[in-house]
Each structure stands twice: as structure tokens, then as C-alpha cells.
Amino acid sequence: MAEPPDHADVRILPPVLLLGSVLLGLGLHWLLPLRFGGGLRLAFGLVLIGAGVAAGGWTLTWLRRTHQDPDPRKPSPELILGGPFRWSRNPIYLGMVLLQAGIGVAAGNGWLLLLLAPLVLILQHSVIEREEEYLARKFGDAYAAYRASVRRWL
């Protein structure tokens, strides 16, 4: 029996999922606007965008610092337990969700907010679960201990 590959069995890159979700939300909004407003909408949206960019940037910095590729189809040479990974097992995906939420709020685009649930579900089943299977297989008890001590999202 062949040994499993040294990477997660992820078939679609998470940024492609984010881009597809945002483009779908923009397209739906163009066809059938689902607007909402409010006095602090733009400010709150910009805060969410900033938080998403910060989470993604911080995570990418830690990945580079530990010589790991953010592409989930590449091997993970070691577990990263510091930086954003102390609070979330998936900080870059959290950043992606915050980014889409922020764009939706800032633009008053309800479709982008409604599409967050499908985005999270697709990320969960198509990416995160596959990554977690790989990490459990590769790092065994160390990953099980990490998984027990750090939440998936926040």
C-alpha cells in the first residue's frame, strides 16, 4: 500500500474560494441589490477589513519565519505554535472571513454577508478538515495536544 503524500489533500486553494465568494456576492448584488445602511457601516467595515488583513499578514509572516509555504498542498515541516497560531488553528482563514465580512459591511452588500456561511462551510469541509487529517497523521500526539488547547477559529 502506498504511503500517503506529505501534504493535505486540498484540491482548491483557499484564496480562490474567497475570490469566488466575493465575485459571486458582487455579481448577485449587481443583479439583485441587497443593500443595507447605517451611520457607522463604513467605519465598521474598514475595521473588519483591517482585522482580516492584519490576521492574514501576521500569519504569513509566521509561516515565512518558520520556512513554511502557505499553500496547503505543500508539506508542513513542523507545527507552528506561536504567533497567531496560539489563538486560532486557522488564523489565515479567519482573516479571509473577516475580509469578506468587512467588504460586505463597508459596501452595504448583504450578499457578501449571506455568502459567509457557505464560504465557511466550504472552507471547513474542503480545506480545514483535510489539513487537520494530514497534520494528525504527520504529527500525531503533538497535533492532538495542540488541537485540544487551541480553537479552530478563535
Image: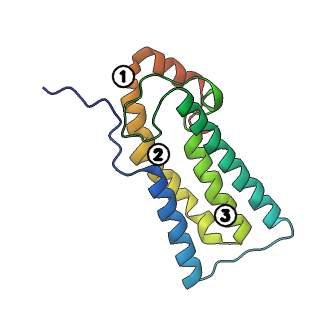
Q: Which mark is residue 103?
A: 3
In-image side of 21 versus 103 (left or right)? left
Figure check: 151 above or below 97: above
In-image side of 78 versus 100 (left or right)? left
Secondary structure of residue under mark 3:
helix
Residue marked by disc 2: 124
Q: Residues within 10 Å of mark 3 (few under 14, many from 20)?
A: many
Residue marked by disc 1: 138
Residue 95 can be seen in this image = yes
**Residue 27 or residue 73, whichever sits in front:** 73
**Residue 67 or residue 53, whichever sits in front:** 67
Image-quadrant location for residue 65:
top right
Report how far apart the C-alphas of labels 1 and 2 lie in the structure. 20 Å
Marks 1 and 2, the one that precedes in the sequence: 2
The residue sitting at 47% across, 39% down in the picture is 70
Q: Amino acid at mark 2?
A: Gln
Residue 87 can be seen in this image = no
